[in-house]
Amino acid sequence: MEIKIFGIPNCGSVKKARTFFEEKGMSYHFHDYKKEGIDEAHLEKWCAAFGWEKVLNKKGLTWRNLDENTKQAVVDAPSAIKLMKSNTSTIKRPVVESAKAHTIGFDEAMYETLFL
């Protein structure tokens, strides 16, 4: 089963996800938003699966540091996708995709249920 983890390497939740799979002896491919960016198709798929409000990380420092006009302009999936594509640090992390399941965020119990 191929597992893909999307995120940024210095994110605590991404580190937890990577450690989880490594400790279970499961291989994965890591997609670094900072180096590789993210395409609109992935963002559209994630917004359809999880809802754009969950994919857009409004709890993070990056969101809090955006100017008010930028924040106010995010009102629906297309506007959220535009922001997330141009500023990948606003995407909730990690996003994990596999043949078995797709998840967003790190929850060890959920990972054990879905991926083991």
Image (spheres, grey):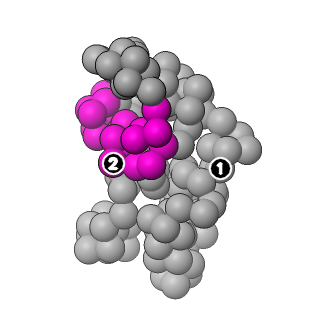
The quarter holding residue 111 reads bottom left
Left or right position of 13 against 54: right
Mark 2, other Cα within 10 Å: few <14 / some 14–19 / many ≥20 = few
Q: Which residue is mark 2?
A: 59
Relative to 14, say whether 87 is above or below.
above
Q: Position of residue 51 (x, y in %)?
A: 26, 32
Q: Is residue 61 visible?
A: yes
Magenta stretch in the rendered image:
48-66
The quarter holding residue 70 reads top left
Q: Residue at x 40, y 17 (%)?
A: 69
Of labels 1 and 2, the one closer to you: 2
Relative to 31, say whether 39 is above or below.
above
Q: Which residue is mark 1?
A: 32
Q: Nearer the viewer, residue 14 or 110?
A: 14
Mark 1, other Cα within 10 Å: few <14 / some 14–19 / many ≥20 = some
Left or right position of 64 against 10: left
Q: Nearer the viewer, residue 33 or 21?
A: 33
Q: Position of residue 30 (x, y in %)?
A: 63, 56
Q: Residue at x 31, y 67 (%)?
A: 107
Element on which disc 2 rests: loop
Does residue 7 belong to the magenta stretch? no
Q: Which amino acid type is shown beneath numbered disc 1?
A: Asp
Q: Residue at x 60, y 63 (%)?
A: 10
